[in-house]
Image (tube, rainbow, N blue to C red):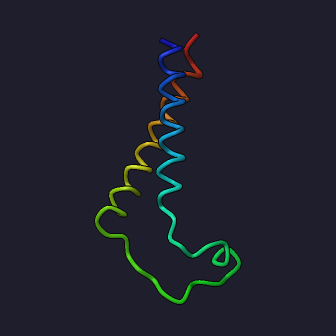
Amino acid sequence: MKNFLLILNIILSVAIVFFILIQGRGAGLGSAWGGGGEHFQTRRGIEKFTLRLTVVLIILFFVISVINLFLK
């Protein structure tokens, strides 16, 4: 059981990294220091789905990690 949860955690972590990387907005690192805030656009369609899927995967990763912590 513990091995299955570890493999599932690895798969989830790769999926989370993938979905975070495809969410790039094209602003670059300039927005990190205050630039690039001239426009605001809400997420629609596939961007909204990708964001929600990423949040669900992160929550699953956390829950499985906590379960794995308490298993012997």
Measured from the top left, where is residue 10 in percent x and y?
54, 30
Instruction: Point out the residue furthest to the left here.
Output: 45
Residue 66: image quadrant is top right
Q: Is residue 3 above or below residue 59?
A: above
Q: Is residue 57 above or below residue 42?
A: above
The residue at 37%/54% (across/down) is: 52
Between 56 and 35, the one lying in front of the other is: 35
Measured from the top left, where is residue 67 in percent x and y?
51, 24
Number of dots carrying numbers: 0
Question: In the visual, does 2 lie left or right of 28?
Answer: left
Question: In the visual, does 57 lie left or right of 71?
Answer: left
The residue at 53%/14% (across/down) is: 3
Quadrant in which the C terminus appears: top right
Measured from the top left, where is residue 22 in percent x and y?
48, 57
Instruction: Point out the residue furthest to the bottom here.
Output: 38
Measured from the top left, where is residue 37 in percent x and y?
56, 85
Instruction: Point out the residue furthest to the right here.
Output: 33
The residue at 47%/41% (across/down) is: 15
Q: Is residue 6 above or below residue 19?
A: above
Between 20 and 5, the one lying in front of the other is: 20
The residue at 48%/35% (across/down) is: 12
